[in-house]
Image: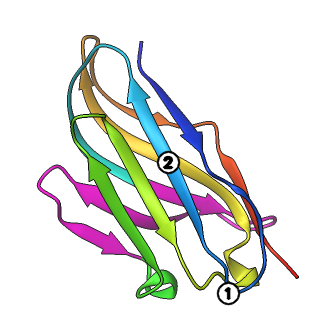
Amino acid sequence: QVQLVESGGGLVQPGGSLRLSCAAAGSIFSIYIMGWYRQAPGKQRELVAVISRGGSTNYVDSVKGRFTISRDYDKNTVYLQMNSLKPEDTAVYYCHAGIYASMGVGDYWGQGTQVTVSS
């Protein structure tokens, strides 16, 4: 069984920074993509950033220049460094991974971590 475990959310003032982490654990053969999504109250879940197995990244326009996604391939972990946070970044952030595991290929999600940007 594969699990994604997130950490790093919390309350921060506007302009502050947070770093989210997501570690994949289980009978994993390879991870072909990892990313972060977020869902604010009353809104649909949206893609924030993704990073491919080869290291290519993509960001939603609203976070470009402020957020950075990275991977530690040895630890099967993805990070999201969030700088210059704004109140509109407030949401539950979910980690996602496309994984080839012992049971086959599948999409996996973390449990979600709350990020609140407020003074």
Q: Please state if 8 lies on the left or on the right of 27 as rendered.
A: right
Residue type highlighted by circle 2: Ser
Please identify the residue farthest to the right as the structure is shown.
119
Q: Is residue 40 magenta?
A: yes
What label does residue 15 carry, if any? 1
What label does residue 21 carry, if any? 2
Q: Is residue 45 visible?
A: no
Count neighbours of disc 1 (C-alpha within 10 A) and say few if under 14, some if 14 to 19, many if 20 or more: some
Q: Mark 1: which secondary structure?
A: loop
Q: Mark 2: which secondary structure?
A: strand
In the rendered image, which quarter contains the N terminus?
top left
Q: Residue at x 42, y 54 (%)?
A: 79
Count neighbours of disc 2 (C-alpha within 10 A) and say few if under 14, some if 14 to 19, many if 20 or more: many
Q: Report the magenta residues as a range.
A: 36-59
Could you say where residue 56 lies in the image, as x and y percent from the top left?
Answer: 18, 65
Q: Please state if 91 lies on the left or on the right of 29 as rendered.
A: right
Residue type highlighted by circle 1: Gly
Q: Please state if 60 lies on the left or on the right of 29 as rendered.
A: right
Marks 2 and 1 sit apart, C-alpha to C-alpha, by 20 Å
Q: Is residue 47 visible?
A: yes
Residue closest to the eye, 19 or 111: 19
How many numbered marks appear? 2
The relative height of residue 26 versus residue 92 in the rendered view (above or below) is above
Q: Earlier in the sequence, mark 2 or mark 1?
A: 1
